[in-house]
Image: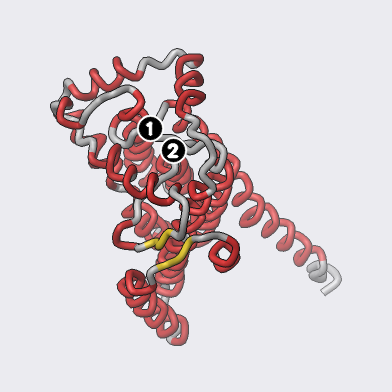
Amino acid sequence: MFVILAVSDLEIDLGSVGMLAQILAVVLLILGYATWRRMVILPAAFGCLAAVFASSLPVLLWTYAAINLNLPLADSQLMRMDAALGFNWYSFIGYVDASPTLAWLLAEAYSSFHLQLLFLPILLVMFGREQRAYAMIFAYYVLCAISSVISIWYPALGTYVMYGVEAETLSNINAKFGYFFLEQFHAVREAGPFVLRLDESAGILTFPSVHAGVAALCAWAAWDVKWLRIPFGLLNVAMAVSAVSHANHYFVDVIAGVAIAALCASVATFVFYRRADTFVSAQQATLPSPAST
C-alpha cells in the first residue's frame, strides 16, 4: 500500500479512515485480551475479524491503483467474449427483471458480500475449522491481488452502459450497484492527484469479478462443514449470478472471477494443509517408536 502511494498520484484522506481505525482498534484489543486469557474460540474469531478489517484499505487501494493507470477501455473485448460464449445479456436481464422474487433474491445475495467475508470465518472457527478460516482469508488476499493486476488491462464501464439500459427502465432489478461505481471510476482515471475517501469508495473492477471470486471462495470454505454446505452453496451461486444481473458485469467477468478463486483456493490449500501435513509427518518421523521406547 505504501509503495503504491509513493509511486502514484493517489492519496488517502486519513479523516475518512477514522471509523475503520476505531473498529480495528477495538477488535485488536479484544483479540489481545482473549489471547492473554487463553479463551476458547475468541482469539481465532477476532483474529479473523482483524485480518478482514485490516485488509480492507490496502485491497481498496490496489483496485484504485489498477484503474488509475488509465489504460484503454476493454468493453468491446469483453462483449466479444460474451458473444463467443453464446451468452445473451438482454435475454438474461429480461428474465430476471420479469420476476420480482428472483430479482429480490439476487439483490440480497449480492449484498451478502461483506457479511460473508466477516462472519463466515467466525462460523468456521465455531465449528472447529480455524485452519479453513485462515485459508479462506489468505485466499481472499491473493484473489484481490491477482484481480487488481489483471484489471489493469481490462478497465470497463460495464454492461448497463454499453448496452444502453437505464435504471429507470428496469421493473424489478435494483441497478444501483451497476451505476454507483462510475463516478469513482471516471474520477480515478482523470489526470492529476486523486484522493481516496473511504466513505465514497466503490468496487470499480469489472474484469475479473471479485464478487464472483469471493462467492466461489466462500462456497469452498463452507464446504468443509457439512451443515454449511447447502445454504452457503446456494447463497454463493446466487451471489455469482447477481454480479451479472445487478452489478454491471459481463458473463465472462464471472467466469474469470471463479477461475481465479479456484487458483487461490489451491494455493491456500497448499500453504495451510499440504505444508502442514508435511511438517507433521516430519515431526512424527523423528519420534522414537514404541518398541525402542
Q: Secondary structure at mark 2?
A: loop
x then y, percent, for residue 207: 48, 36
Q: Secondary structure at mark 1?
A: loop
The reply, left or right, for residue 109 in relation to residue 84 is left
- Residue at 70%, 56% in the rendered image: 275
- The residue closer to the viewer here, 160 or 237, is 160
Amino acid tagged 1: Gly
Quadrant location of the C terminus? bottom right
Alpha carbon separation for disc pair 2 and 1:
7 Å
- The residue closer to the viewer here, 20 or 120, is 20
The reply, left or right, for residue 120 in relation to residue 100 is right
x then y, percent, for residue 271: 65, 55
Quadrant location of the N terminus? bottom right
**Sequence-wise first label, 2 or 1:** 1
* Image-quadrant location for residue 120: bottom left
Pointer 1: what residue?
158
Q: Are marks 2 and 1 in contact (CB under 8 Å)?
A: yes
Pointer 2: what residue?
206
Amino acid tagged 2: Thr
x then y, percent, for residue 215: 41, 42
- Residue at 67%, 59% in the rendered image: 276
Residue 46 lies, with reference to residue 159, above or below; the image says below
Q: Which class describes the residues within 10 Å of circle 1: few (<14), some (14-19), or many (20+)?
A: many
Which scheme is used to colour this image of the protein?
A: secondary structure
x then y, percent, for residue 232: 36, 43
Tag count: 2
